[in-house]
Amino acid sequence: MSLGPKLEINASTTYSAAPTSGWIDISAYVAWDQQCTVTRGRADEQSAVTPSTFACVLDNVDGRFTPGNSGSPYYPNIKIPLWIRFTIVDAGAGISSPRFTGLVDSWTVDVSGPNSYKTVAATATDVLHRMQRFRQIRSFLHEEILQDGPLAYYPMDDGKDATGFADQSGNLQPPLQVYSIGPSGGLDPGGTTGPPAAGESAPNFTPDYSQGYANPFGKYLQTNLTSPLTIGNGHSYTLEWWMKINVDGNYGETYPNYDGASLFYTGAMMVDGQNLIGGFYQGPNGPSPFVSGGPYTNYGTAQTYLACGDRTSTTQARGLGGHLTPGIWYHFAVVSDGGTTAASAAFYQNGHMMGCVGSFVPLSQPPATVKTLSQLQIAGLPAFGGALLDGSVAHVALYQTNLSQTRLMQHHLAGRNGFYGESLRNRAVRIIKYAGFGDQSASSAMEASGTPVVNQSADTALNLIHALETTEQGLFFIDPSGLPTFYSRGHRYTSPVLTLDASPGSGNVGVGDVVPILDDSRLINDVTTTTGTGSSSRAVNNASVAANGTYQASVTTVSASPTNGDETSRWIINGQSNPLIRIPQITVDLLTQPSIRAAVLAAKLLDQTQFTNLTTGYVFGIMAVEGISETWSIDKQVVLFTVVPNVPQTTVYTVGVAGSDELDTSSARLGF
């Protein structure tokens, strides 16, 4: 071969990003007399990108690539998954072009014939394959909480038939069990819908006040964590939850026959015999739930109280929140950096810091010596006579770290509106992170797209990404260096153009490699687009319908823009409502065309390509690359591009501008 193919492996067990060091060169063992192949991309612009693949055959005479062979110099790393990287190098031409970076998913030892055990076939796929196998993405609130590594996490979305509520932290904490104070009072495990954007069920607690409003009967939840919370001596922590009340707790007004004090409700609490971390809601006209009334003079006002300290002490740190409106979900958090002063604690309501009153005292909480709290109680606190919640609690999470206000605000927004209105680029970055591929927010491979998007429902990571692709008419893939990449629709018009000479006998491609096709495979002349807000827009090219018949399509986007449906429908009609002569594939033999190697190897998915010197009568313009297949061996260097027509930018459709507000059937491109 005139080029220098390079093959490397890496035993890194970090799969969120391709390794930057530790690569081992195994190029000397590749059987270059047999073909190495690479594929990536998709069949056309309406299809989904499939994981890139790589395959090669390795010389295994000494058994170095036999899995489990302790005599291998690579033992025990001939395994799956194993990072592998394939690069084409031509030092003389200044070429070092990654062609594939991914993970080996099979080692197949040839055990037949004269070459028994002397060769191994290795196949690999890029990390998009791992995203395909990733668990379903839950609500964005669920995923944001998991991003911060909770010690325990109870979404409490187990449904109407649940008898307990399971931990989702991955730490195998025991479930929350139902407990009773008295013989009556209700709990409907799936009786309400949780925080607005989560779209999940939540339990509803309804105490029984028939025997007296001051001490109702009812249900609460409790568990003893097998991995407890450590406090004291600098150990930081966070407890957060969402809560909704059914009534404001002023039973003197709600129930006219009752003239006693109003109740206080428990949200979520970490407790032991003395220490308490969590929060209450105090109805109007009620007494202080704290010993001796605490340092307050404002009991009797409906208010939220978050506490962190010794429950028998009047000097514990406490936060004062506002009045809660029945039927509205609120987000709360108690945070401590493990210190022993009031400044060490912070209290949050809906992502905003609450006023802090009171103070810590040594040996109060956190204590000077380390101790653990294992008991979690929700919607009730027997130590305070019950404090039973008339309402709902959901998404209770406990962390052995002090979450920042920035992170708590992200949790709040995730539950409040699901990041409604964030840019499509930021949404793509978010989903990629949820799927375990790190924070790509600073990556130049994630192209800008300011299209606002709505909250997305639970689905697989790839389906969520595909919805963004459809909205943007863009493309998500893993590039040859292993980097997650999102191209916006503009890339297909602004990328470098790979120009190939089609002169018969002297061009860059063979005579048989340019095969024009005129068919209806891409024809759409009647399309309806429904956006994430529910609005629909239909566009029809009546001239095309008259000439070709009706070719209908329906498109669903997740855009929050009121004009997205109209724009998308018009964009599709403009580009696909008339049959175009197209070239579905372009084959380039680099073995005979060394002068264009660098340009061909630089071409990426969604880049532009075009021909010069085509035979008279072939009419088509610039094309967009949708797929790439490669074959490399000692006597073969072939790159095959799958392409689709790319509507030229000669005219941009602009609403309300004379001469530009009607779509040309051949050359106009909608600018949006």
Image (cartoon, helix red, strand yellow):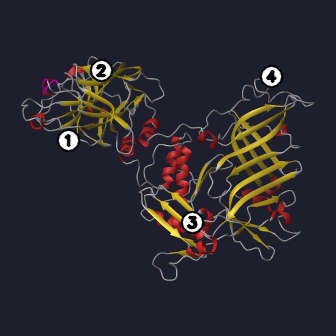
Between 462 and 55, the residue placed more toward the observer is 462
Of the numbered discs 1 and 2, the one sitting upstream in the chain is 2
Q: Which mark is in front, 3 or 1?
A: 3
Q: Secondary structure at mark 3?
A: helix
Q: Is residue 363 visible?
A: no
Disc 1/disc 2 C-alpha distance (Å): 28 Å
Of the numbered discs 4 and 2, the one sitting upstream in the chain is 4
Who's the residue at 61% across and 37% down the image?
Answer: 15
Disc 4/disc 1 C-alpha distance (Å): 71 Å
Of the numbered discs 3 and 1, the one sitting upstream in the chain is 1
Label 4 sits on what residue type? Answer: Gly
Disc 2/disc 3 C-alpha distance (Å): 58 Å
Graded by Cα atoms within 10 Å as few (under 14), some (14 to 19) or many (20 or more), the crowding at tag 2 reads some
Disc 3/disc 1 C-alpha distance (Å): 51 Å
Contact between marks 2 and 3 (CB within 8 A): the answer is no
**Residue position for label 1:** 323
**Residue position for label 2:** 179
Whether 617 is among the magenta residues is: no
Q: Quadrant of residue 71?
A: top right
Contact between marks 1 and 2 (CB within 8 A): the answer is no
Label 2 sits on what residue type? Answer: Tyr
Graded by Cα atoms within 10 Å as few (under 14), some (14 to 19) or many (20 or more), the crowding at tag 3 reads many
**Residue position for label 3:** 572
Q: Which label belongs to residue 580?
A: none
Q: Which label belongs to residue 71?
A: 4
Of the numbered discs 2 and 3, the one sitting upstream in the chain is 2
515 is higher (above) or lower (below) than 5: below
The majority secondary structure of the magenta stretch comes to: loop
